[in-house]
Amino acid sequence: MKKFFQVCLVFGLAVQAVAAAGTNEAKPEEVKKTPATPVSRQTYKEIRGILEKQYVDLNQVTPEKLDAVASEGMLDSFGSAVQVLSPDDLKKEEQDLRPVIGARGLIQPFIGYIRFNRFDSKAPETLWQVIDEMESKDHISGLILDLRFVKSNDYMVAAKIASLYLPADVEIFHWEKSVHSEEPGIRTVAIKDRITLPMAVLVNEQTEGAAEVLAAVLKEQSKVVIVGRSPTAGRAYRTADQKLADGKILRFATEKVRLAKGTELFLKGLQPDIVLEFSSETEKDIFSKPFEAPVEFTEKPLFNEAILVGKASSPLPAQVEKERKERVIPASNDDLVLQRAIDVLKGMRALGLS
């Protein structure tokens, strides 16, 4: 409840900035589909028999095509938790060799920004070192942790990163299997100097697996707000591969994450505290460019005291327009998710929550 009121207060301070952005895209009109009516196996066989004899285009209801439609519908109903892959699909799963941290920077005057590319065993230590440097050198009092486009199956790394922020020996999640399991829950580890900064965590629909578990665990803390334009991927699960008779591989979920407080991410993902309408293509384009901290531009006043008393001349509209055109605007200025995170942390600071 305490966090709820804090988020409401912080978001209230950011409302004007959100409205002023004016770049929110209108949602396209959704085509409403007639929901499918579940039928029994017997009814399915009856429907199939009728279609095979009386459907307007018998070429579309051959046994082979009906089998393909049925299997496709079955797989679709499981979402990402069940997939049929080809051997070529497995070959395409290349190891991610990018640096663990993709970008870092200082957003004036007091906010640190860290963007992950991926997780590995050194990620917790690397993150702690970067934050420690930012606190000691730049004196930051707020942090933005960007987990957009981060895909990871290293759940123990997520637990260790969460340990930087949480008390020691706290259960944060456990694995839930199809059969009863006595496997102990995953707990935080002892950290000498925990992070206490207010934090905004950025997510999108490509924040997957261990990354969305980390975001979900942090969301339960009082000084953390999740910002994004969509829920996370809902892929916080472990899978098994089984080779099929035709050479393809059936990949299916065998265990799913459940947070210590009961929250489940399976297929539905994590819903951000603050959701923005923002183009996925624009977001991808921003990430394709090197990170530069956003810049606030201040217009020169057309009138001030010196101008009014005749000691200075007002800039001509052409001069003002020329200065605007010559500005070098970082791509991050168009990142509505990042901008709202900045607003939130400024609000937290104003409310004395830092």
Image (cartoon, rainbow, N blue to C red):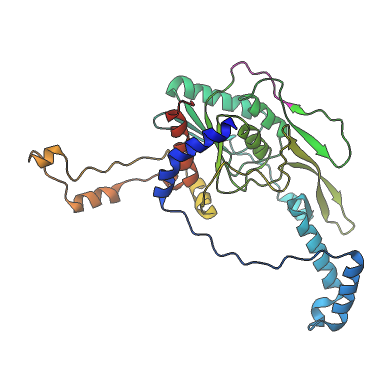
Asked whether 206 falls inside the magenta stretch, the response is: no
Q: How many labels sit on residues? A: 0
Q: Is residue 299 visible?
A: yes
Between 338 and 86, the residue placed more toward the observer is: 338
Q: Is residue 52 left or right of residue 302?
A: right
The residue under the point 88% across, 36% down is 180
In this rendered view, identify the residue nearer to me: 77 or 30.
30
Tell which of 263 and 144 is nearer to you: 263
Tell which residue pokes out farthest to the left in this image.
310
Which residue is at the front of the view, 336 or 292?
336
Q: Evaluate whether residue 122 shows in this view.
A: no
Magenta span = 187-193
Q: Residue furthest top?
A: 192
The residue lying furthest to the right in this view is 42
Prevalent SS, magenta region: loop
Please state the horizontal and vertical placement of residue 251, each as a whole percent of the image.
80, 50
Q: Residue at x 46, y 54 (%)?
A: 24
Indicate the position of residue 3 as horizontal and vertical percent values. Answer: 57, 32
Looking at the rendering, which quadrant does residue 158 occupy?
top right
* Residue 349 rendering spot, x and y as whole percentages: 44, 28
Q: Is residue 303 left or right of residue 94?
A: left
For the N terminus, the quadrant is top right
Query: Which of the 4 image quarters holds residue 270?
Result: top right
239 lies above or below 130: below
